[in-house]
Amino acid sequence: MVTKKVKIVIIGAGMSGLVAANKLYTSAAYKDLFEICIVEGGNRIGGRIHSMEFGCNRIEMGATWIHGIGGSPVHKIAKEIGALESEQPWEHMEGSSEEELVTVAEGGLRIDPLIVDRISNLYRKMIEFARGKLSAGVADEVDYYSIAIEAIKKYSCNNKDDKLKSFSLGCFLRHALRAYHDSAKDQECSSSSSSNSNGYSNSSRCSIEDAMFAVHEHAERAHTSAAELSNLDYNAEREYVQFPDEEITISKGYSSITESIASVLPTALIQLGRKVVKIEWQVENESESRPVRLHFSDGSTMAADHIIVTVSLGVLKAGFKNRQSGMLFTPPLPSFKADAISKLGFGVVNKLFLQLDPTTDHGNQEMGEGFPFLQMAFHKQDSELRDQSIPWWMRRTASLCPIYKNSNTLLSWFAGKEALELESLSDGEIIAGVSTTINSFLCNSQQRKLLNSHKYSNGHVNSVGTTNEFKFTKVLKSQWGLDPLFMGSYSYVAVGSSGDDLDKMAEPLPSIANSDVAQATPPLQILFAGEATHRTQYSTTHGAYFSGLREANRLLQFYHHQ
């Protein structure tokens, strides 16, 4: 007698889907018990991991960093397969370029390194406080702990909310900056001085510091994918976990990791170009022996005993907003699952690569050879120093940097509505906008004479720049927002949601505990994996990896006890 195998269909060939398939396929029970299949809507594996070549360099369109190599399964795989070494140049091959950043305000004002360091340290300390890593009584030049506590007090006083419900990270950071300015004013008053130790007036110092603080806020938007930091839940910061030790990129490309994970799977196991548009579960048709039926965009169907859904949170959200473009569930998902999908945040982050014309000399004596690691500080809308020629979609990018020292390939990150706008722009419009921005920051201009006057710099701020025009030969951008297979980049805990919602995302349907004793409703029909289902490492490849492993082990454990 031939026993029917248990059919498991995994939707999505990204990190979590491939890890789940790998674990199930290599288990001792596989050959006798399981029939496994991955259905992928696109024409490649990897999902939001997508390595490419650009200008003879290896670059990443999606996932870029191993966020801490200590204990990282991604780093372990990369090391085992020799992906950490390459003769071909790659993105961030020298690690972080933070120590080489040149911070300039629009118009060509080079911000005093002392101010850059002071505000950067303030921002880092406030993030440490939000994550529960900053203690009181630490000997420091500035009492950062007291500043953070004052920010919390001001918020609580203004909102009569001691429990900090619906408190955003962005709100905390802005209250902290104001508390910092207030403490600086108190120090100046006590010393009977109308200017600080660097000779700036209060107004000019605050304006420069505000622009510098905004640089870090813009970078945080790209790190978290939150369109606005006011959308980012403050309390969730303490739950987020990052592996220790350095953060690195992978010399042979992040795709080498997913390719390695998939290499043990038979080619026929992965079906590309199979976009799922509807999932029927709790199927009770007597002619159908399996409880789940998948419907594909080409009209075909597939039955399964269990499915593991690894699509992005963006695709799940779209299913509620637009029945034509999203994935539908019949019957609808239970309210606890639907609420979690609705409340959690999912943003858009895009990367822009530009190749400089190699025939043009972009070096200058002050900053060395090659294009600088440029950190851009933009002025507020009401500032008289604001350069009106800079397009709005460039104004919340934190930096424009070579992908490694002396590279002719530049990289900038975009988030939120600016990232979506980038997707709609032509190469010519992008080049024009970036060139205008660069010219304001680095090229000689009439405005620089005003910026370097005693009124604004008081002799402590110098201009930087070159008389060269910047020409680009090639443009490459990611387009995660409008891609129907992703509908965005990665998840975050939004104000109004919590880590509990991430746990709810991971709950299978129906759960074993809720299934009927007589098994009229088979358990574990739909399982969920992906970075948005991991409570402490959401938004990362690590979260995706562990979630895929979790769901594979859930099924293995279930059948181990049968």
Image: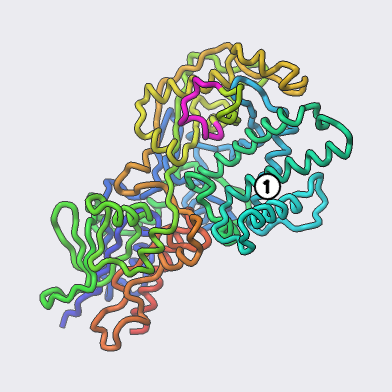
The picture places residue 288, in percent across and down from the top left corner, at: 14, 73
- Regarding residue 372, the answer to whether it shows in the image is yes
Left or right: 134, with 485 as reference point: right
- Which residue extends farthest bottom? 518
Give the quarter of the figure containing the N terminus: bottom left
Camera-side residue of 496 and 81: 496
Residue 378 located within the stretch drawn in magenta: no
Indicate whether 186 appears above or below 283: above
Q: Range of the magenta residues?
A: 387-399
- Regarding residue 77, the answer to whether it shows in the image is no
Camera-side residue of 24 and 102: 102
Q: Give the residue type at disc 1.
A: Ala
Left or right: 98, with 438 as reference point: right
- Which residue extends farthest left? 287
Indicate whether 55 appears above or below 443: below
Q: What residue lies at 65% left-to-right and 47% top-to-bottom?
A: 175
Left or right: 326, with 420 as reference point: left
Q: What residue lies at 37% left-to-right and 66% top-to-bottom?
A: 337
Q: Main secondary structure of the magenta part?
A: loop
The residue that disc 1 covers is 176
